[in-house]
Image (tube, grey):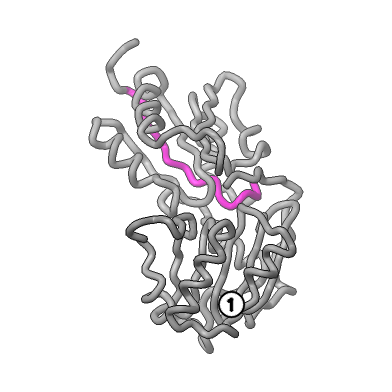
Amino acid sequence: MNDTLFGTVYLVGAGPGDPDLLTVKAQRLISNCDAIVYDSLVPNEILSLVKASCECIFVGKRRNKHSVPQPKTNELLLELVKSFKCIVRLKGGDPFVFGRGGEEAAYLSGKGVSVEVVPGVTSGIAASAYMGIPLTHRLCGSSVTFVTGHEGFNKKIPSVNWKELAKSSDSIVIYMGVHNLRYIVEQLLINGLNPLMPVAVIQQATVKGQRYLKSTLAEIVGQVEKEKFESPAIVIVGSVVNYQVSECAPTPSNVTMPISF
């Protein structure tokens, strides 16, 4: 194999699932790339845009199943630029929002690889919009925080400061939070968030199988468990949930998203 690096890696956001929410640039790159490395939360309808001669490689991460370690993905991308001119690293949502895009960009840039980021619609914004929930509102929400719920109770030094979040942000949007929802809610309650604070859980936000649940912080865990909500889902905590205008919510597409976390 030629060791000369002649390819460009495009870190592309696939958006929240509905192919109609792809950016024009993302669609063009997906349709014309020579190799594509994609994650779990990319539906088949988007992958169908890839040309027949494209090298397609899956590196998605799934809970309790074999996952490709991040260093292996980094190395894979480095190898691909030795053989292909246009490589798309396709990620659900936006590549720089809980997508490890920053890690991949830093690694590749450090190896002399040409990297370009193509933003995508992140699911935290899309989920709220598709339910008609404004994440900010002049009457109740001047701040919003996006946070991962993927870290668990057994992490020695949690990177999410739930104590400060409970006091400092009008709205909290939690990605990948269903699995650890009980722990998250406990932390928010312990640190002073009102038990009556409204909470929304949105599963499969922009695609077929969309599900929605509204409750209070004190009762949301029991409701989610009763209704058997699963990932991918977004949790929204804040008074903005009460300002939902469902009449303006877009209709989910007929695309089915993979269950992955």
User: Dividing the image into 4 quarters, which one contains the N terminus?
Assistant: top left
The percent coordinates of residue 140 (x first, y second) are 52, 86
Question: Residue 46 or 28: which is nearer the viewer?
Answer: 46
The percent coordinates of residue 206 (x first, y second) are 67, 56
The percent coordinates of residue 7 (x first, y second) are 36, 26
Question: Residue 137 or 156: which is nearer the viewer?
Answer: 156
Q: Residue at x 60, y 78 (%)?
A: 218
Question: Residue 21 or 149: which is nearer the viewer?
Answer: 149
Q: Which residues are magenta?
A: 6-19
Q: Residue at x 52, y 56 (%)?
A: 122
Say whether residue 126 is left or right of residue 193. right
Q: Residue at x 63, y 39 (%)?
A: 46
Q: Residue at x 39, y 45 (%)?
A: 101
Q: Which residue is mark 1?
A: 217
12 in the magenta segment: yes
In the depicted structure, whether residue 222 falls above or below residue 61? below
Examine the rendering and report whether any part of residue 23 can be seen.
no
In the depicted structure, whether residue 191 falls above or below residue 159? below
Q: Mark 1 packing: few (<14 Cα in 10 Å), some, or many (20+)?
A: many
Examine the rendering and report whether any part of residue 185 can be seen.
yes
